[in-house]
Image: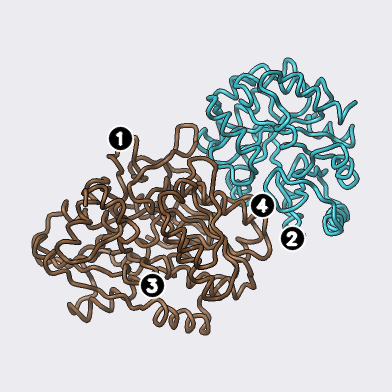
């Protein structure tokens, strides 16, 4: 069975971690994945860096820039992930912007994902209509999930459409914001999360953007199947002791 | 051949709205309303009144006699440099501020490179009493101090973009991030025919006043509204699109778009997008952009801050690919020489952006008697430092 489906069937309070490939050191990509799995992460989102990441705040922007300066690109990333499935068993998604994917070739990209055992993708600036008309068949051919984002401003009609096109989970943004803002669960966010819950969507949901601590993680888990931590994790990585910093970060969540 | 936007927001292979979900409601709100609002009688009346009384339109179409003699053709200059704030940019900001008001927006954001669009935005915000935040690359802030001062005096907050190359591309990224974080009350006034649909079409519509007037003025002055050539410089391409707009479907009129070659197209310091770029996605639309094989956006170079952009608007990409427009390039040196030439032959100091279009006249072979319109998109006051340094004045 598909690793993502299986995960959501078997577990709740799912902890997903985002990090940028090639950061802090070019060769850290797989080592971070292995250490995250050992330390209890349930799902991984590996970012492929882009020069103009408009949906990201300063921390992830800086990690992308450093990764590019280090020499990361999609060709190298797939090369690094060649033996991923020898050591990593949890689901892995790739996350990044559409232009590097287009230049690599959508078909080549999906094929490479399938070959190394990547389970799906999150491409925030790939419009739903383009995905539906042009890319969905390619994603399906290689068995990849495509994850869409939903914000508090997304209409119910559109959420239903996203639910129909999704086959993994739906990525709920805690607010309309770039990455790296703190989650403030106010009455309005609560109403929004409850509204989503009441829609009885066919896909599970994960809350992302603004999750930085055990406290915010637990809050998010009240409303969804789990939550995604990105900025706080990327910030905690130390170039000199990557494994140690991963272990240390994960202690708070999986003691 | 359809050279204009289709119902899906595309110009042939180019255009679309490649935006994260966070921007979808804003862009969708615009998409659903922009034509309705723009075509509304009240809007048209207010827009044209302001263009007339506040901007000073129609801008003259001036037959440059000495230049005409030199090039053996009738060289007409469309004098956008005489607009309030000194460039064509104000045509678009007037249109967009009226639209933003009708959408109930309270806060305006913009990006700027040289500062012309930033000044034009700060100006209309002062005019209408709206809060204004302008994103500008940290390096451009240093290069364009007088325009930064103008924006501040007009009441705008100028926020430095400190990521990436710290120039126009990064200022655009920062403005998009601001819009993501302020999804309800804010309107983003994009300054060129770039960005997600409907921006390229909307900005082109506001700038199309340039060619609308030109046609009328040509009839008055020559009895014929079909020039042989129309020339304009292209960074993102808003003055060019305004200058081309009403001539696009008239294939007898040759459209020439002049990009910035910087230190030369092969020098590694260039902004000649159609020569150096490939198809891809930047700032919300599919177009042609300068990028690495891996799809990372490449830093452009031009002496002119307004042309220092790694992409072009999607409609330009379409005109280029279909061959409807001829896309050429001019180096830093050639543009500065052309700026000096116009100054000394006609008594007009052009913006270095516009000087790129003028410089191409040197490379054309006229038979004599052709009618040629060059869009003089802005005045050169802001470029005096560069001119003085280059010519040792």
Residue A155, label in figure: 2
Of residue A189 and residue A162, the one placed in the foreground of this image is: A189
Of residue A106 and residue B101, the one placed in the foreground of this image is: B101
Answer left or right for A25 relative to B290: right
Label pair 1/3, CB-CB below 8 angstroms: no
Q: For the residue carrying disc 3, how many other residues have a C-alpha within 10 Å: few (<14), some (14-19), or many (20+)?
A: some
Q: Earlier in the sequence, mark 1 or mark 3?
A: 3
The hue of chain A in the figure is cyan
Q: For the residue carrying disc 4, how many other residues have a C-alpha within 10 Å: few (<14), some (14-19), or many (20+)?
A: many
The answer to whether one can see residue A81 in this image is: yes
Answer left or right for A171 relative to B133: right
Q: Residue A83, image x and y in percent?
A: 67, 16
Mark 3 to mark 4 CA distance (whole Å):
37 Å
Subunit under mark 1: B
Mark 1 to mark 4 CA distance (whole Å):
39 Å
Answer left or right for B171 relative to B342: right
Q: Tell me the mark number nearer the camera, choosing from 3 and 4.
A: 3
**Disc 2, SS:** loop
């Amino acid at each position: 069975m598909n690793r993502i489906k299986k995960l959501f069937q078997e577990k709740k309070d799912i902890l997903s971690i985002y990090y940028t490939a090639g950061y802090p050191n070019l060769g850290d990509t797989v080592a971070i994945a292995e250490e995250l799995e050992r330390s209890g992460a349930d799902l991984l989102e590996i970012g492929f860096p882009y020069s103009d990441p408009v949906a990201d705040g300063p921390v992830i922007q800086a990690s992308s820039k450093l990764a590019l300066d280090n020499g990361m690109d999609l060709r190298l990333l797939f090369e690094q992930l060649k033996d991923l499935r020898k050591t990593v068993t949890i689901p892995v998604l790739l996350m990044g912007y559409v232009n590097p994917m287009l230049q690599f070739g959508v078909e080549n990209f999906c094929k490479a994902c399938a070959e190394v055992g990547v389970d799906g993708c999150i491409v925030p600036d790939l419009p739903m209509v383009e995905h539906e008309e042009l890319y969905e068949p390619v994603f399906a051919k290689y068995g990849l999930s495509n994850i869409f984002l939903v914000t508090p401003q997304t209409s119910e009609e559109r959420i239903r459409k996203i639910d129909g096109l999704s086959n993994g989970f739906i990525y709920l943004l805690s607010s309309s914001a770039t990455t790296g803002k703190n989650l403030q669960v106010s009455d309005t966010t609560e109403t929004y999360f409850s509204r989503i819950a009441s829609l009885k969507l066919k896909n599970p949901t994960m809350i992302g953007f603004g999750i930085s601590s055990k406290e915010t993680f637990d809050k998010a888990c009240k409303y969804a199947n789990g939550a995604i931590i990105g900025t706080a994790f990327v910030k905690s990585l130390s170039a000199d002791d990557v494994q140690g910093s991963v272990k240390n970060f994960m202690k708070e969540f999986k003691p | 051949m359809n050279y204009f936007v289709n119902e899906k927001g595309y110009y042939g292979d180019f255009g679309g709205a490649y935006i994260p979900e966070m921007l979808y409601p804003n862009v969708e709100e615009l998409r659903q309303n922009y034509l309705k609002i723009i075509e509304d009688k009240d809007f048209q009346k207010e827009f044209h009144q302001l263009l007339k009384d506040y901007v000073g339109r129609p801008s003259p179409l001036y037959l440059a006699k000495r230049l005409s003699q030199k090039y053996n053709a009738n060289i007409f200059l469309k004098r956008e440099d005489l607009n309030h704030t000194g460039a064509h940019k104000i045509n678009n900001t007037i249109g967009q501020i009226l639209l933003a008001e009708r959408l109930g927006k309270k806060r305006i954001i913009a990006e700027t490179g040289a500062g012309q669009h930033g000044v034009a935005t700060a100006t209309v915000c002062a005019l209408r009493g709206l809060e204004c935040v302008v994103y500008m690359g940290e390096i451009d802030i240093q290069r364009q101090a007088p325009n930064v001062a103008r924006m501040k005096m007009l009441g705008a907050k100028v926020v430095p973009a400190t990521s990436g190359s710290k120039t126009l591309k990064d200022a655009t990224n920062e403005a998009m991030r601001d819009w993501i974080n302020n999804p309800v009350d804010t309107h983003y006034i994009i300054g060129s025919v770039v960005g997600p649909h409907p921006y390229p079409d909307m900005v082109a519509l506001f700038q199309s006043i340039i060619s609308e007037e030109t046609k009328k003025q040509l009839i008055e002055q020559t009895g014929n509204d079909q020039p042989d050539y129309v020339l304009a410089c292209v960074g993102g391409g808003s003055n060019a699109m305004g200058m081309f707009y009403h001539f696009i479907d008239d294939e007898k009129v040759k459209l020439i778009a002049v990009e910035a070659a910087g230190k030369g197209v092969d020098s590694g310091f260039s902004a000649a997008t159609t020569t150096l770029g490939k198809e891809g996605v930047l700032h919300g639309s599919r177009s042609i952009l300068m990028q690495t094989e891996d799809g990372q956006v490449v830093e452009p170079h031009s002496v002119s801050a307004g042309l220092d952009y790694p992409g072009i608007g999607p409609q330009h990409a379409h005109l280029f690919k279909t061959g409807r427009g001829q896309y050429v390039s001019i180096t830093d040196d050639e543009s500065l020489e052309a700026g000096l030439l116009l100054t000394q032959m006609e008594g007009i100091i052009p913006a270095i952006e516009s000087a790129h279009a003028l410089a191409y006249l040197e490379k054309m072979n006229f038979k004599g008697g052709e009618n040629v319109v060059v869009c003089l998109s802005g005045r050169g006051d802001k470029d005096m430092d560069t001119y003085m340094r280059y010519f040792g004045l």
